[in-house]
Image (cartoon, helix red, strand yellow):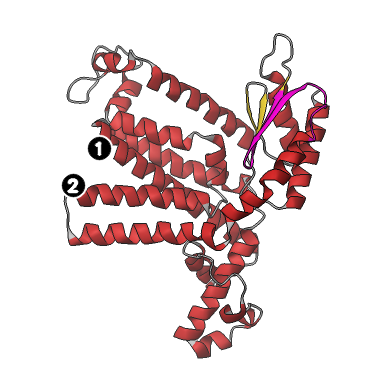
Amino acid sequence: MVEHVTKLLVLFNIVIKRILTDKHFAAASPHLCGAAGTTARVSLPVSLPFSLFCSRRWAVGLFFGLLAVLGVALTRDYGMSWDEPAERLNAYVSAKYVALRLAPALAQRQPRLAEIPALAHYPDADHGVLFMLPLVALEALWPGANPAEWAYRRHLLEFWLFGAGAWAVYQLGRARLASWRWGLAGAAILLLSPRLFAEAFYNYKDVVFLSLFALAMLTLARLLRRPTAGRALLHALACAAAIASMNIYRDEKLFENAARLEPIWADAIHSLKGLPNVLDIRTLGLVAGIDLASIPDGVGRRAFNALDHAFQKEGIMIRTTGDTIALTPPLVITENQIDEIVTKVGNTIRAVA
């Protein structure tokens, strides 16, 4: 299912970008929709789809409703990130601390809490747990027979949070551009990025911060437009949530780690020079581009074959554009993982030679 959805995402992304770059789109809109948002000059049987497009309530409701349903349908098709167990343990450490403060007698009778490190002696005690904390509290109260079920629930809730962030982008675009259609197009472009869409199920750092930041900007825009105490409080809460998720970059020294690994990454990637069909290699920070020779009469086919082989056979996800392999590893990467990536990318390049 993931393969088919990815193809649809790529197709819709192309369509949305084509619409946004089409100078005739704005001029054509009055011929499709009347001034009051009703269809005009459109004959059956296409009048119903166009009427849905022209009706803000129908179009927006259908768009975000289908997004919510899509999250339910795809949750089990995505795995866990390598650091999800660590993120879960961080939240349990904080949950144990809170439980011992609020209900010490009850907490001390819980056998599971005895196995969890104390906050005072835990090395990662400063990590933000805003998103995870309420979820592990619910997991502790209703553990269930299969721990993986709670992982799927966390993934679904994160995807819905990403959907809420996309809704905030829609609202901001609608207000800024004075058009709900352009606002919806902006939200669609955000959602139709294949990597963002996939990581919305398991990336508890970047995607959570992105979503909360979008919501914080929406609350700020509404506060500036009509200041009230309630809107000020809502904006403060949204900003606090975004900052709490952002602090992990500082606490885990992710930027310092990226700077330290930059020369190691560059040397490892450039070791792929000389492999079949490799024309050029470029690196910048923890980013790399590897240009491959095109297959005659098939520009982009070799890189697509590389993407497919890397995912299916090597177990890594790469990005491609034309016949260029683009590598953008996470900031938490280690030296051993760099070696693993380079080995698997080398295997992939040889396989598609």
Is residue 88 shown left or right of residue 323? left
How many residues crowd mark 2 within 10 Å: few (<14), some (14–19), many (20+)?
Answer: few
Count every numbered label the image shows and give the total: 2
Residue 273 is a magenta residue:
yes
Q: Position of residue 226 (x, y in %)?
A: 16, 50
Is residue 140 shown left or right of residue 171? right
Circle nearer the N terminus (1, 2): 1
Q: Are marks 1 and 2 in contact (CB under 8 Å)?
A: yes
Query: Which disc number belongs to residue 175?
Result: 1
Question: In the rendered image, is residue 116 in sight?
Answer: yes
Which quadrant, please, contains the N terminus?
top right
Q: Position of residue 92 (x, y in %)?
A: 57, 72
**Residue of label 2:** 225
Tell me the magenta residue range. 271-291
Q: Secondary structure at mark 1?
A: helix
Identity of the residue drawn at 56% across and 45% down: 199
Residue 233 is a magenta residue:
no
Is residue 105 shown left or right of residue 299? left
Identity of the residue drawn at 25% across and 37% down: 175
Query: Which disc number belongs to residue 57?
Result: none
Structural distance between the alpha carbons of marks 1 and 2: 11 Å
Q: Position of residue 306 (x, y in %)?
A: 73, 28
Is residue 271 shown left or right of residue 299? right
- Can you tell which quarter of the image residue 276 is in? top right
Q: Position of residue 221 (x, y in %)?
A: 25, 47
Q: Amino acid at mark 2?
A: Arg
Identity of the residue drawn at 50% across and 65% down: 128
Identity of the residue drawn at 54% across and 27% down: 10
Question: In the rendered image, is residue 314 in sight?
Answer: no
Q: Amino acid at mark 1?
A: Ala
- Can you tell which quarter of the image residue 87 is in? bottom right
Task: In the rendered view, tell whether residue 115 sits above or below residue 183.
Answer: below
